[in-house]
Amino acid sequence: MPLIFLAYLTVLLYFCIFSNNIIIGCIFLLSLGIALWRKFYVFFPLLLIFGIYFYLFNAYHSQKMALPEVAFHQITPRIDTLQVNGDLLSFRGRVHDRNYQVYATLQTKKEQTFFKNLAQNCRISFTGNLEKPAAQRNLKGFDEQKYYSNQNIYRQIKIRQINAVKLTHNFNIWLLRRKGIVWAQSHFPRPMSSYMTGLLFGYLGKDFSQMTTIYSALGIIHLFALSGMQVNFFVKVLRKILLKIGIRLEFIPFFTFSFSIFYAILTGFSLSVLRALFQKNIPAKGLDNMAITTLGLLLVYPGFLLDKGGQLTLLYAFTISMLQQFSFTKSNIREALFKTFALNLIAFPLLIFDFFSFQPLSIILTIGFGLIFDKIMLPLLLITFLLSLTGLSVNLNVLFLLLEKMMRHLYQWFSYTPVFGKPSLIGLLGLFLTAGLLVDALRKKKLRFFCAFSLLLILFFVKHPVAPTITMIDVGQGDSILLQDRWNQETVLIDTGGRLTLPQPKWKKAHISTNADNTLIPYLKAEGISTLDHLILTHTDADHVGDFLTLARTIKIRDVWVSPGELTVPTFVHQLKRAQLPIHIVKSGDKLPIFNGHLEILSNGYTHKGDNDDSIVTYGDFFNKKFLFTGDLEQEGELKLLKAYPRLKVDVLKVGHHGSKTSSNPYFIRQIDPQLALISVGKKNRYGHPNQETLATLKKAQIKILRTDQVGAVQLIYHHQKWQVKAVR
């Protein structure tokens, strides 16, 4: 009875319980039938035990999420998770056997220095708010609530004021990890210290965020994920030391196992380290080793496969085990290239399912930089760190400065990563099946071409959605609306969202990702969009155009449509020059072909200042429904629009200025007579949008209202000859 088949059934059962998906359920029942036909009867009681265990764990998750919030004003940080980023402090803490993610804003530079150098356990007294992590905001987007719940965190704390920090003298393994991180940061210059904490302790600070972006775009950020590379290195070193000092061979597994537990804790229980340590300490070989590792991980850490990192590390390990059966006795180089290609091909479906894009260059870079990290950087950094503990300081920073210079040059050449979109579950399974068959058929020419064609066909449908859609993307307090024609024939984006940044003292400046990095860009990539045909920037407010440059660095844009008034704002003109994109200055009557019709410019602004009433107003009659997108147009502009188009009628209105009371004139609303009003607005925003007067105006006209702060992104899909409305929540 193959253990790997039991592991396969257990993983299917796991996803049946946690995802409650009918497709996975059908595959599980079919696979169970095969087990019954093969007379693997012993599998059934084992699967029953695992099923009960997973069900109880899932119920525990749900119960923890539903527990009432209990007020408290003290928390004990898990000291190794503490991060200082400008004036922002974050850590994970524990109160009454419950875990919390904590955020605070530091008030002084002295406070910042204290927490940066803190290498002692403590208890923090505070005043703040307790709340649930944010739920999913965009279709196919990141779910912060789910991400934290998979790590047994069900609430987050926003500290308004730190009242006191009481240092304690208790010792734990987390403190040892923290001391190692602080020692590296305080005794070595950047960027050397970042590589040291990353490769030795699995910790990359926020000050490494720029390089993280570069390594991610080149597809090799996984080299920083503590994995089999570090495990093999440290276990080999330990084994050699033990043999040198005369430890008998039969006692060595005891020492390596003890070290494995210590190292897992020291690296913050990195999922890839856990997997590698399991594999290293299980005496079974090949697929049996992989099966026992999988079952063991699911028992010890049942949330393992709910995490993207856990899924990827297990998939990589399984693929490597499978590829051991392939051998090329005539050429070691050919064997290495084949196995690298096969490994990336098998991982490819999961990578695009999670990240929507894949950098082909990463196949080559992983081989080259994997050797550099494993054979050169890791030993050098370990030796340098250990020498520093004796008082000997070795500065290798010039090597890391040269490395980063080289990486920046590579990034300039390959900054646009190929985008494939996010496959559905059926698409994901189809990609896995065809990728696996392709690897198996690489030596069979006819079957090889058939599998490759099938793989490309599935990818085509993933990247090119069939149905036309109009999506109000949830970018928080801002606007961004995507018009996406069938097969991605034409794509038009109206505004990018963004947030206003105010001047700050140098010590307060934090390395933070832009709003678009977390909302707009992932959504575009998930939809298979690597190039926007047209970007319309309605006016110059930061919540509409603030993320323009971030978008332009990541997604190709054929041209940008702006009003004459926007060109009177120097800061906005500077952004346009930096982007170096073709600019079209709009005028009333301009049209963009899309949806078997046109998106028409009704107004190119009324004030010629780039402000709210200078917003570009667009209109389209698409498949017998009329859409009006008004930017931040206010009441005076609305009345001017009606004067120019007295017979204007609308089915779907993107409400002006996020539902502010300065927009949505009652007369204007009555005249255009929409059926559906869309309001793009941030949750608990400081402006009080949407205003109650505006909501009353819309309700009085019996207009259905959908708001991003309440339902997340809103998508209108043209399907079966009619528009259907879909929201995230």
Image: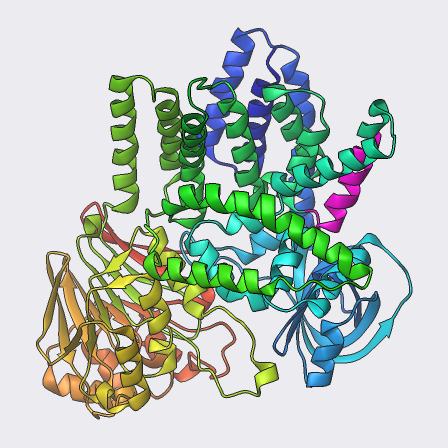
Relative placement, left or right, of 360 versus 67 is left
Residue 593 sits in quarter? bottom left
Q: Where residue 415 sits: x, y (%)?
A: 35, 59
Q: Nearer the viewer, residue 345 or 4?
A: 345
Q: Where residue 380 sits: x, y (%)?
A: 65, 52
The residue that appears at 50% across and 47% down in the rendered structure is: 369
Q: Overall secondary structure of the magenta stretch?
A: helix
* The magenta stretch spans residue 96: no
Query: Compared with residue 161, is residue 220 higher up or lower down, i.e. above or below?
Result: above
Residue 531 sits in quarter? bottom left
Query: Compared with residue 388, is residue 428 higher up or lower down, i.e. above or below?
Result: above
Q: Nearer the viewer, residue 481 or 371?
A: 371
Q: In which quarter of the image is the C terminus?
A: bottom left
The residue that appears at 75% across and 45% down in the rendered structure is: 263
Q: Where residue 670 sits: x, y (%)?
A: 23, 79
Relative placement, left or right, of 33 versus 427 is right
| Direction left: furthest residue | 589
Query: Compared with residue 311, is residue 713 higher up or lower down, i.e. above or below?
Result: below
Relative placement, left or right, of 257 versus 697 is right
Relative placement, left or right, of 235 versus 663 is right
Asked whether residue 429 is in view, the answer is yes
Asked whether residue 161 is in view, the answer is no
Q: How many circles with numbers are drawn on the protein?
A: 0
Q: Quadrant of the N terminus?
A: top right
Residue 429 sits in quarter? top left
| Direction right: furthest residue | 169
The residue that appears at 10% across and 56% down in the rendered structure is: 596
Q: Which of 236 and 37 is in front in this view?
A: 236
Q: What stretch is highlighted in magenta?
A: 254-269
